[in-house]
């Protein structure tokens, strides 16, 4: 059994991007791994995003970011509602052995 006490996923988004409009208008997101034959297992996470305006949180997240963040990049927290992991030994193994997690409502 896996127990996660606290998990925070954040992303900075380009201010004028279609992704920003999607998050502001609807809030839903989905992220998934790229299929790599050398590492064929898969992972997907989905849920809702919320805009973070707290400067303390923004500064802490930006400090560890992989590019220099400026004020034009809004920060979103990705709230996880569902996660799915599919394990495969090789790219030819089908179907994957799926493990699923869903947030309590």
Image (cartoon, rainbow, N blue to C red):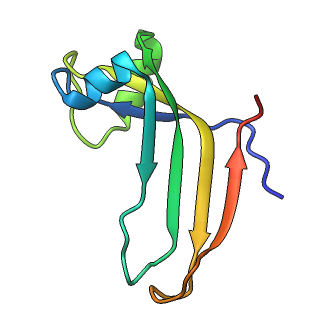
The foreground one among 61 and 100 is: 100
Residue 51 coordinates in the image, percent (x, y): 42, 16
The foreground one among 32 and 62 is: 32
Residue 98 sits above or below residue 8 on the image: below
Residue 59 in view (yes/no):
no
Residue 55 quadrant: top left
Seen at 34% across and 29% down, the residue is 62
Residue 102 coordinates in the image, percent (x, y): 70, 43
Seen at 43% across and 36% down, the residue is 29
Residue 87 sits above or below residue 6 on the image: below
Extreme residue in the left direction: 16
Residue 15 in view (yes/no):
yes
Residue 1 sits above or below residue 54 on the image: below
Image-based side of 29 in relation to 66, left or right: right
The quadrant of the rendering that contains the C terminus is top right
Extreme residue in the right direction: 1
The foreground one among 86 and 11 is: 86
Image-based side of 16 in relation to 74, left or right: left
Residue 48 coordinates in the image, percent (x, y): 51, 28
Residue 27 coordinates in the image, percent (x, y): 44, 23
Seen at 61% across and 50% down, the residue is 83
The quadrant of the rendering that contains the N terminus is bottom right
Seen at 27% across and 24% down, the residue is 20
* Number of on-image labels: 0
């Amino acid at each position: 059994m896996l127990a996660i006490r606290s998990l925070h996923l954040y992303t900075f988004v380009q201010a004028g991007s279609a992704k920003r409009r999607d998050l502001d208008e609807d809030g839903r997101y989905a992220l998934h791994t790229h299929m790599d034959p050398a590492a064929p297992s898969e992972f997907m996470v989905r849920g809702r995003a919320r805009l973070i305006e707290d400067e303390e949180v923004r500064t802490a997240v930006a400090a560890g970011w992989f590019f220099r963040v400026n004020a034009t990049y809004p920060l979103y927290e990705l709230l996880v509602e569902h996660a799915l992991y599919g394990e495969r030994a090789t790219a030819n193994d089908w179907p994957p052995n799926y493990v699923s997690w869903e947030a309590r409502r």
